Amino acid sequence: MRPTRLGLTLGDPAGIGPEIILRWLATPYGRGQIIPVIYGNAVLLQRVAHALGLPWPADLIIQPAAAGVPDTDAPVLLDFPFPAAATVTPGRVQAACGQMAATWIEAATRDALAGRMAGMVTGPISKEATHLAGVPYPGHTEMLAALTGAPRSTMLFWSPDLIVSLATIHVALQQVPTVLTSARLLDTIRHTAAACARFGRAGQPIAVLALNPHAGEHGLFGDEEARLILPAMAAAQAEGIAMIGPLVPDTAFLAERRANVAAYIAMYHDQGLIPFKMLAFAEGVNVTLGLPIVRTSPDHGTAFDIAWQGRADSSSFAAAVRCAALLAERSL
């Protein structure tokens, strides 16, 4: 079997992204099966390695980014010019870091679209830093959808025992009822069903969470269940997708329920991510569905509070790499 070449972006330079990639490179990580191409900066990575006493990968090829991806089976660092690399302050929001993080994402996406990568794994970014840099997207998912021309994308969180998709993503809670539509929810259901098949979890129903307390209590606490959610579920069932719900969220994630569903669809960000991260944080992976490329990411953020302190855990990043390789093999 041919090895899988994956593009890895460092994420925000002032966060834990550089550390977790260095830690991951120091592990066996599937050498021979996975060829990592890191979109980053040599000075920055060397600073982090020196500060934390982490080993520098002896077989890492440093290639100027302008020269493109070399034809090699060795790990590669595409070295992008980054004037602030020597002066980045760890743990702080900085516009230069937000701009660099976006540059790496854009470059990796271009290479994935061109077929130079089988997929990409993105390090955590600071949405505040990218905003300061003038990047016009609230997060990775929206940026990748725009860069790839995807008409609709879905944020899914995967672990070996739990899958959760989000019907809405980075919007204020008060905006959720206005952003949520039956068409949007139906797209999320379709994306999730297709992903479940590729993850080997077809055959069980997809559970849809209610938006309101007590699933609206027949309109007493809101009508979104009847007006928006049930029509989308009916349309999905007509397409042959098994569904249950809308489920009352406060009991939906009990163990006996989780054992009998393929995936959950949450109506808003924290409704899905609070239970997911409580149950699967260390092995959780963020997957973007609906793109013409494979993209995964660890399920945590930049962790500025522990950046460059030698305390970051690379487990979720390692899981994201394994997940991207699996999805690339199965042609998501």
Image: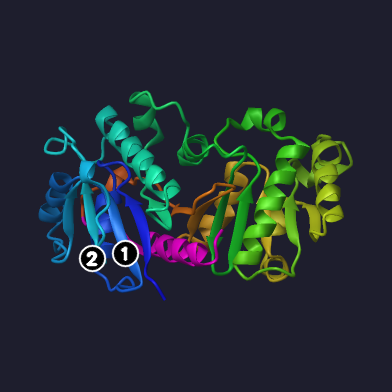
Query: Badge 2: how crowded within 10 Å, few (<14), some, or many (20+)?
Result: some
**Foreground of the two, 3 or 60:** 3
Instruction: Reply yes or no: does residue 61 show up in magenta.
Output: no
Quarter of the image holding residue 158?
A: bottom right
Q: Name the residue under label 1.
A: 35
Horizontal side of 149 relative to 107 (left or right) equals right
Residue at image position (57%, 40%) is: 150
Scheme of colours in the image:
rainbow
**Foreground of the two, 148 or 139:** 148
**Foreground of the two, 38 or 262:** 38
Horizontal side of 299 relative to 39 (left or right) equals right
Proximity of marks 2 and 1: CB atoms separated by less than 8 Å: yes
Image quadrant containing the C terminus: bottom right
Image quadrant containing the N terminus: bottom left
Going from N to C along the chain, the mark reached first, 2 or 1, is 1
Count of numbered circles on the image: 2
SS state under label 2: loop
Which amino acid type is shown beneath numbered disc 1?
Ile
Residue at image position (33%, 25%) is: 133
Quarter of the image holding residue 199?
A: bottom right
Instruction: Reply yes or no: does residue 311 show up in magenta.
Output: yes
- Up-down relation of residue 81 to residue 310 (above or below): above
Query: Over which residues does the magenta segment extend?
Result: 310-332
SS state under label 1: strand
- Up-down relation of residue 55 to residue 231 (above or below): below
Q: Mark 2 points at which residue?
A: 74
Percent of width and height locating residue 113: 45, 47
Task: Please name the predominant secondary structure of the magenta segment in the image.
Answer: helix
**Foreground of the two, 122 or 150:** 150
Identify the residue at the far right of this view. 218
Which amino acid type is shown beneath numbered disc 2?
Ala
- Up-down relation of residue 327 to residue 208 (above or below): below
